Amino acid sequence: MKEADPIVFVVDDDPLIRDGLRSLIKSVGLHVETFGSSREFMQRKPPDAPGCLVLDVRLPGLSGLDLQRELNESNIRIPIIFMTGHGDIPMSVRAMKNGALEFLTKPIRGQDLLDAIQQAIAHDRAARRERAKMADLRTRFDLLTLREREVLDLIVAGLLNKQIAGELNIGEVTIKTHRAHIMQKTQAESLAHLVRMNEELKSNDRR
Amino acid sequence: MPSVPIVEAKLYPLKRYGLAIVFVSSALLVTLSLHYYFLDRLWFLFFAAVMASAWYGGKGPGWLAVILSSVAVEYFFIPPARTWILKPVDVPFFLTFAACAIFASWLSSRRRQAEDSLKHARDTLEAKVEERTAELTRRNEELLLQIAERKHAEGSLLATQAELARVARVAIIGELTASIAHEVNQPLAGIVANSDACLAWLSKPQPNLDEAKKAASSMILAATRASEVIARIRSLITKATPERLKLNINEVIEEAVALARTETMNNNVSLVTELASDLPVVLGDRIQLQQVILNLAMNGIAAMSSTNGRPRRLLIRSQTQDADRVLVAVQDSGTGMSPDVMARLFEPFFTTKSQGIGMGLPISRSIIEGHGGRLWAESTVSQGSTFQFTLPTEACDVS
């Protein structure tokens, strides 16, 4: 599966800074889209590509921190690099707590920004891969019937076929059939693999 | 209100009644001893005894004297003498005697009572006057205390106002600075971003000149904007052109001194002025010059805050200098300044005060220079500093 090219989004109300950043980011071969306000950015449908958001704190209307909150609320996961003219500590703490990746003070050194962007994209790639993997696991495990799920729970609990048969009050041969179906549907290569996938799904659900 | 006779109250009852017995006994003895000459007509001595008893002893002893006299008269003098026999023919006489004695007693005790209450009234009057006087004195003291308190409150109110004004000034400057910082920082950020982009395009194996040019143009735009911001701030400041009015600098000093009064009092500083009386008129902005003098005075007071063992003295002097200049000097007896401090004195934002912003002296100097004068400082460590400025006189300013 070929991954889409990463996109860097820049939101700053100052056109000179916007153009400068666009040009700088473009110069290292990345796709850039710029916006003058949070609203403009919100109207853009989130693309199916890795990327990051370079966001000014001080914006007319919805501020950068407000936009971060809205994105969190609508479950849009994109790494954010904040820029500010006068970064105070409480503000940066708040931003970092809410998941910001970086907090840079204007004027920003070009290399610092590009490094942060590369890091953010790598971060987003990994996160996206993780999410895709989880979605894939979820679809596979969703194929299981109710009875198969019962059997799965007992398998991962470490019970033998005979014990499972006793527990569910059905024949051992039937358990063996269920077991084969489970391995096939979840594309598990081994019992250990099955257990691991099940664990991953569970812990992802808990998050 | 029946007032208790003071004499009666003072004498013990026993003594008072004893007195009545003594009086009547004396009357009886005298009457008996003089019986030979006056026969049986010496009754009046008993009246005297009754009156005396009532007078000195009060009502009760009066009555006792009446009874004793009547008994004595009946026993000794009403015939047959020395018997208790009272013949019907003598009853009217005896009753008249008794009635007269009662009357005498009543009259005497009433008289005495009246006199006593008069005396009492006089005494209580004195006491009342004393009490009232004491109360008035107390009230007066309270009033004085209240006045002192009020004065103190006024003093601290003034101090609070001054502090408030200072805080407000600092807050305004802080806000102004933040706003200027943002206004200038934005184009600077634009310049840096575009320069980085420009360099990036130029350092590629195949430099992209179009993009580099675009970035460079943006840099010029941003830099122009930054200088516009600065020009705007300058025009904002110079818009308030100072007035040039004919001023007697001594009046300006007096006004500034009045404003510094609370501060000097709070800091135990004695403020002395030595103002030359025949100073030529200067042209200037009264408020601005006042601000300069006040600022120098405040600095002087602050410089003496740790002066102990020597008098804290702030001297403000005015005099003519070189015929066409007026000199004003503010001299403190503070700690003085080291050469390092002296060297940086007029740098903006340089301050030795914990809460200073370091703008007082630079602003003062620019005001004085704006008036065509000069402001400088001299200092001796551990003896104090003198800040002085000259101003051209009117005649000089015109030329």
Image (cartoon, coloured by chain):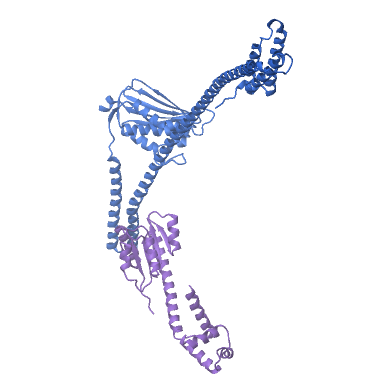
Chain colours: A purple, B blue
Q: Residue at x 37, y 78 (%)?
A: A2
- Does B96 sit left or right of A10 as displayed? right
Residue B280 vertical position relative to residue A54 in the rendered view, above or below: above
Would residue A9 be seen by someone viewing this image from the given angle?
yes
- Does A198 sit left or right of B165 as displayed? right
Q: Position of residue B271 (x, y in %)?
A: 44, 27
Q: Quadrant of residue B91?
A: top right
Residue B287 vertical position relative to residue A178 in the rendered view, above or below: above
How many numbered marks have been drawn onto this rendered protein structure?
0
- Does B15 sit left or right of B386 as displayed? right
Q: Quadrant of residue B68?
A: top right
- Does B231 sit left or right of A174 as displayed? left
Q: As drawn, which residue projects farthest toward the top?
A: B37
Q: As drawn, which residue projects farthest toward the right?
A: B82
Q: Position of residue B15 (x, y in %)?
A: 69, 21
Would residue B206 be seen by someone viewing this image from the given angle?
no
Q: Position of residue A70 (x, y in %)?
A: 38, 66
In front here: A31 or B237?
Answer: B237
Residue A22 vertical position relative to residue B121 in the rendered view, above or below: below
In front here: B213 or B183?
Answer: B183
Q: Residue at x 38, y 37 (%)?
A: B362
In front here: B320 or B167?
Answer: B167
Indicate the quadrant containing the N terminus of chain A: top left, top right, bottom left or bottom right: bottom left
Q: Position of residue A84 (x, y in %)?
A: 38, 57
Q: Residue at x 51, y 79 (%)?
A: A199
